[in-house]
Structure formats: structure tokens, C-alpha cells
């Protein structure tokens, strides 16, 4: 038992050091045969302030936002688990639905400020041929990236099963269709329920 605990603590310390040496690149342990991450460790983000903000990290235009990476030790989620994480927060939280350019610019700014590579949104086309948000609203406003993994504009459904919407910070911040079982952090949102 002591050996296992020592291994876990040693691994966590090593991951923290590697993260700093890699200039903020996430440390990934193991990759499945289909390229899915098995475990991603993101050290506590230096921009997060838990003492002042136990649930809500930002309030923008009447909406409260929760950044999962500031609260869960850097855990990443599948799209489904990201949605459940937000719902478990209570207070009407859901994964972010980017319905307006101002909110899109806000989310892009968050990714840049926190030096995040990507996040899940509530966007999906599961059970549909159209993209829609978890709220049931179709994605009228869009900001699909001009480039994807195959060099084509998004959404490109490169793997033939990319049915969930992520925001990716690579060569600019833009929307990407993605496999729903890819592991990412999430931004959750709700109506602002208290003042900061």
C-alpha cells in the first residue's frame, strides 16, 4: 500500500515538473490504439483563484461561468461526462452554449488567458444531422475553424464519428467537431445566481 501511494505522489510531482518544463503542455499518460487519451494531468492553473471563487470563476453579460480545470485538479472529461460534471454543480449549470459572438470572444479569451488547449461545449449533433446546443437551440451563430487535423475546414467529421463540439486553441481559437469520447476540460455556464 505504501509503495502505491509513493508511486502516485512521485508521479504527480514528476508530472508537475514536466508540465513546467514543457511550457504549459499537458502531460499525457498512455494513448489508446485509437488515439484517445487514457489520462491527462493538468497541474493547477496559476490563474485560478479558489479562495475567492469556490464555484464561479467569471461572470460575463449576466451569465456565471465555471472552469473545470480550476476546481478538479486538472481532470479531463468525455463530452458526456463534461455535461454531467456541469449538471452536478447544481444551480442550473450546463456545458457552455456559445450562441453569440460576444460569448464566443469571451470563451476564446478564457482559453488564451488560462493557456488552455481546448474545452468541451454543450454542442452536438447526436441523433440529428444539425448541430445544436444542450439547451435545444440550434447553432445559429457559428465560428468553425478554417483548419482541422486533415487540413480541411471544420466541421470535417475526419474520423467519421465526430459528433460533439469543442473549442480548440490552435492556430487561433475556433470550433472543431470531435469524437465525443475525447478527454477535455469543460466550461460550464448558468444564469448568474450571485454577485462576485
Image: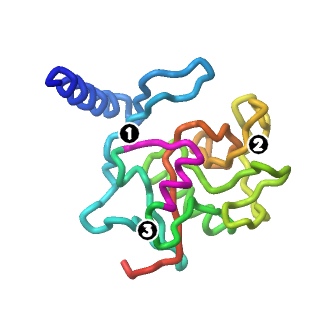
Distance from Cα at disc 3 to Cα at disc 1 = 20 Å
Pick whichever of labels 3 and 2 is earlier in the sequence: 3
Q: Residue furthest left?
A: 2
Q: Give the magenta-colored segment's residue range.
A: 74-87
Q: Quadrant of the N terminus?
A: top left
Q: Say whether residue 79 is magenta.
A: yes
Q: Position of residue 64 (x, y in %)?
A: 48, 72
1 or 2: tag closer to the N-terminus: 1
| Neighbours of disc 2 within 10 Å: few (<14), some (14-19), many (20+) | many
Front position in the image: 90 or 52? 90
For label 3, the residue is 58
Residue at 51%, 62% in the rendered image: 87
Task: Give the percent coordinates (x, y) of residue 187.
Answer: 51, 57
Is disc 1 surrounded by few (<14), some (14 to 19) or many (20+) residues within 10 Å? many
Q: What residue sits right under mark 2 in the picture?
A: 154
Give the residue drawn at x 33%, y 56%.
48
Q: Write down the residue under mark 1.
A: 42
Disc on the earlier residue, 3 or 1: 1
Q: Is residue 196 left or right of residue 189?
A: left
Q: Of discs 1 and 2, which sits in the foreground? A: 1
* Disc 3 crowd, CA 10 A, few/some/many (<14, 14-19, 20+): some
**Is residue 79 shown left or right of residue 23?**
right
Q: CA distance from mark 3 to mark 2?
A: 28 Å
Disc 2 element: loop
Amino acid at each position: 500500500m505504501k509503495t502505491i501511494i509513493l508511486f502516485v505522489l512521485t508521479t504527480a510531482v514528476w508530472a508537475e515538473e514536466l508540465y513546467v518544463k514543457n511550457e504549459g503542455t499537458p502531460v499525457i499518460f498512455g494513448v489508446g490504439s485509437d488515439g484517445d487519451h487514457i489520462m491527462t494531468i493538468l497541474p493547477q492553473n496559476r490563474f485560478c483563484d479558489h479562495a475567492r471563487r469556490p464555484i464561479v470563476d467569471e461572470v460575463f453579460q449576466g451569465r456565471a461561468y465555471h472552469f473545470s480545470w480550476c476546481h478538479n485538479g486538472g481532470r479531463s472529461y468525455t463530452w458526456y461526462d463534461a455535461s454531467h460534471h456541469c449538471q452536478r454543480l447544481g444551480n442550473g449549470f450546463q456545458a457552455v452554449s456559445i450562441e453569440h459572438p460576444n460569448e464566443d470572444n469571451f470563451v476564446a479569451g478564457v482559453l488564451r488567458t488560462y493557456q488552455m488547449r481546448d474545452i468541451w461545449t454543450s454542442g452536438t449533433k447526436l441523433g440529428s444531422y444539425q448541430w445544436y446546443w444542450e439547451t435545444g437551440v440550434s447553432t445559429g451563430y457559428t465560428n468553425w475553424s478554417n483548419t482541422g487535423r486533415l487540413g480541411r475546414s471544420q466541421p470535417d467529421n475526419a474520423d467519421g464519428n465526430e459528433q460533439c463540439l469543442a473549442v480548440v486553441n490552435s492556430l487561433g481559437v475556433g470550433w472543431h467537431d470531435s469524437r465525443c469520447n475525447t478527454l477535455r476540460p469543460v466550461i460550464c455556464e448558468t444564469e448568474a445566481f450571485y454577485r462576485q
